[in-house]
Amino acid sequence: MTLVDPALRATRTTCPYCGVGCGVLATPDGSGGAAISGDPSHPANFGRLCSKGSALGETLGLEGRLLYPMIRCSKGTMERVAWTDALDHVAHRFRHIIARDGPNAVAFYLSGQLLTEDYYVANKLMKGFVGSANVDTNSRLCMSSSVAGHRRAFGADTVPGCYQDLDEADLLVLVGSNAAWCHPVLFQRMLANKQTRGARIVVIDPRRTETAGDADLFLGLKPGTDTALFSGLLVQLADSGALDSGYIERHTSGFEEALARARNIAGSIGATALATGLSEPEVAEFFRMFVQTQRVVTLYSQGVNQSAQGTDKVNAILNCHLATARIGKPGASPFSLTGQPNAMGGREVGGLANQLAAHMGFTPPDIDRVRRFWKAPRIATHEGLKAVQMFEAIGRGEIKALWVIGTNPAVSLPDADAARAALKKLDLFVISENVRSNDTVRSGAHVLLPAQAWGEKSGTVTNSERRISRQRAFLTPPGEARPDWWIVSEVAKRLGFGAAFDFKSAADVFREHAGLSGFENAGSRDFDIGALTSLSDEAFDALEPVLWPMRPGESEPQPRFFADGRFFAHDHRARFIAPEIPALRSETTAGRPLRLNTGRIRDQWHTMTRTGLSPRLGQHLPEPFVEVHPADAIRFGVADGGFARVVTDYGQCILKVVVSERQQRGMLFAPIHWSEANASAARVGALVAPFADPFSGQPESKATPASITPYEYVFRGFALSRVPLQLPPQPWWARVTVNGGYGYLLADNADLARWQSWFGSVAGGELAEYRDFGGGVFRAASFVEDRIEACLFVGPARDAGDWNAVKTLFAADSLSDDQRRMLLSGKSADGLASAGPIVCACFGVGRTTICDAVAAGAGSAAEIGARLKAGTNCGSCIPELKRLIAQAGAAGDEQRRLARAAN
Ligand code: SF4
């Protein structure tokens, strides 16, 4: 593999979104953009990309970028300063606060989006030279329960398997994972195994997600009961003779206690059914499949991790794999799916407050070893504060200086309003960022440092299977943007640590990171890439994707761990863990009768600072919503397509209602992506309880007691504009990027005259209006020559205008006379029905068009693809196509049943 494919002139790099870690070919267009395709030679994806990865080329614009350092001046405004001044200021203020209040009065909050080299330098500065372990990361919210579970069971944070196991398994068990939307390329790989080898898929989730559509068995268990299900499974494995007693005897400890606890929690199929809310036949079928299949991979993700009992859930799963020795063998392993592109790299360097460095902890030998390697003058000797604790300490005034690098905690933390209030108390609040403004920046930042973005920066990331890949630069960094490792190193030099931070390049940092991993290792620690310590700059540039460990002297990497029964505890044995009796941390009450689950949607990533730039990705689910079971919708008086206020003890949001049987009764689901930057009232993090797991510190993001009530708006509508709009105060709105500009979906109770006057004040060019105030309708457009500059459609819900049809006209460079006349009708100019909400982002195929094709006889995703092309590029929408086909089938069955009954 080479850095640049000479035939294509494409740079080989890695996708910046999820933990699948797909290889990307980026071909710059010379104007700041690039054509994007999947890298056929990358072993994570073999050329495939999902909808998000495919749209990366639409996210490279410089709009909203932070281009130079800024400091808040005495008048309270942010002023541009030179890099030297910004770095001097940050170092001076850190030094002052450390001298005054001690090293634990300062903290870094990092990100799973950082490159390993950025992470390494920040971790080294804080833990080795400032002398505090207050370094934590948004990965705490993502997979820290898996880390804690691994460390308890294996003695190290080791992912035992690799992606090849997904091709070779006979049974794939997905627990708390909507892989169809959150790890789409890996999910396609699992489906390929199902199609070619007949692997069966079990999906365990309180929500019937798109992933469940392809399951041979779906278990819609009650929230928080995964531990009970896997405890019941351990009992079943023991009682049916499926244990590997020799492996248990030779390589593990604690089995009897764990089994006794499992019997206590769920000692039979009946007890498991009772504890989980599943039926006995469902439980029995799952147990039968697991017991009878040697090649089983259990994949778990945020539904397991984001829980106040997340570590116990992980260990309940690991117990079943250890008990059967189905670990680290081809097609047989537990497998933690990481959410973020470099959560694993962060774990490798130790960028979590309860790790020291390079998979070493705070034991005296590890502290001594790292101290000697770094020549660290004041190394941290105990764990620091994990994310939730860290922000609570900021709120109490104990942490006085915070440096946030590459993340948006004012949106993503639980109890996010409290986190935002805490940020305003800081004496020093530094942010390294790509964007000029986001909710965290607006929470009182004192210093903004412009960091390089994806496509500009260079270094390494590690995916879910321990594969290190290069992220390579293919664009010139804009303005004065710099690599994060450089920014932190410059501050370190100004703090007096120049000799330890004299890095000249990302390759320099990587070599030191590799050196530390191999230092006094000799197989005693899992993470070892010592063989890469002496890479030349050229070899680093050309580094192929490689699995770790890469121990010195070994020519081939080791793809799997633990089949030989050698673990990383001092006695080399794995530990069975007896989990606590499962119980959610909070009770529902008469005032909060429901539980709020939060998560991702298919086409957005985190707080949308990158995916929100893509018109293609904005088409799928453009509005923030809450999903409600039909029975709960009736009970609480909310209607599909209407609005609802969702309230918890921590905050409230107003969201569009989606009534769906995919949602379990008693549960709500709301996506996490919207912030104050792109919606009026949809920061879902503000609703989430700050309860955290006692071992991992990971917050429970999926079970906050909540209430829902209808919220009425008289008017609905939308605005489209070539430039961002300042909307009048009060309305509900959500912003989405559209082809040619910005779209705002609106709802309001103010009178129409206010909208008329507002549009007159923001629209330039030639104005056209349609006004029926008596009927509650106002529509207006402004034109420059034959192009729409801006338009506004407001009306009652049934008559607000067709968003998709008007959006199409807005995207055009010029309108014909007919189109111009039709525009204010709010219907499509050719008189055709709207395509409906977009399902296939790649080809812009809408739900109505797909349903019409199904009604006309398309009975499979392949047939829809043949007729409409939908699903034939990235494949991310195929699960949704299958669901629409199934729904049409069910509706047809119902019609036939009614017809028979009528006869
Ligand atoms: S699955 Fe999609 S988001 Fe994840 S790494 Fe691959 S292309 Fe990127």
Image (cartoon, rainbow, N blue to C red):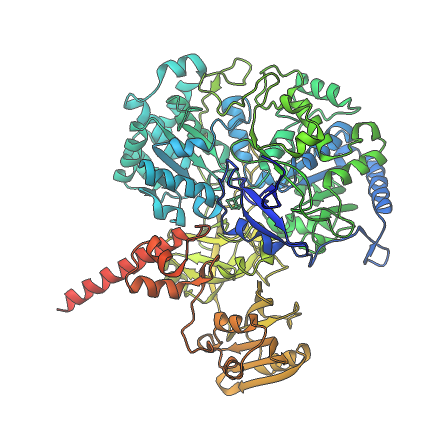
Locate the C terminus and report the quarter of the image it occupies.
bottom left
Q: Nearer the viewer, residue 30 or 494?
A: 30
Find residue 797 and report its horizontal and vertical position in percent.
Answer: 46, 74
Residue 28 in sight in this render = yes
Find residue 586 and report its horizontal and vertical position in percent.
Answer: 49, 44
Q: Nearer the viewer, residue 24 or 489?
A: 24
Q: Toward which corner of the image does residue 127 lie, by quadrant?
A: top right
Taking the image as shown, residue 634 lies to the left or right of residue 503, namely left
Residue 661 in sight in this render = no
Q: Quick check: 691 above or below 673?
A: above
Find residue 230 and report its horizontal and vertical position in percent.
Answer: 38, 32
- Count of numbered circles on the image: 0
Find residue 711 and report its horizontal and vertical position in percent.
Answer: 49, 67
Q: Quick check: 653 above or below 459?
A: below
Residue ranking furthest to the left? 903
Q: Quick check: 544 above or below 611?
A: above
Residue ranking furthest to the front? 7
Locate the N terminus and report the quarter of the image it occupies.
top right
Q: Nearer the viewer, residue 759 or 697?
A: 759
Q: Quick check: 695 above or below 565?
A: below
Residue beneath the point at 47% across and 30% down = 162
Residue beneath the point at 34% across and 43% down = 215
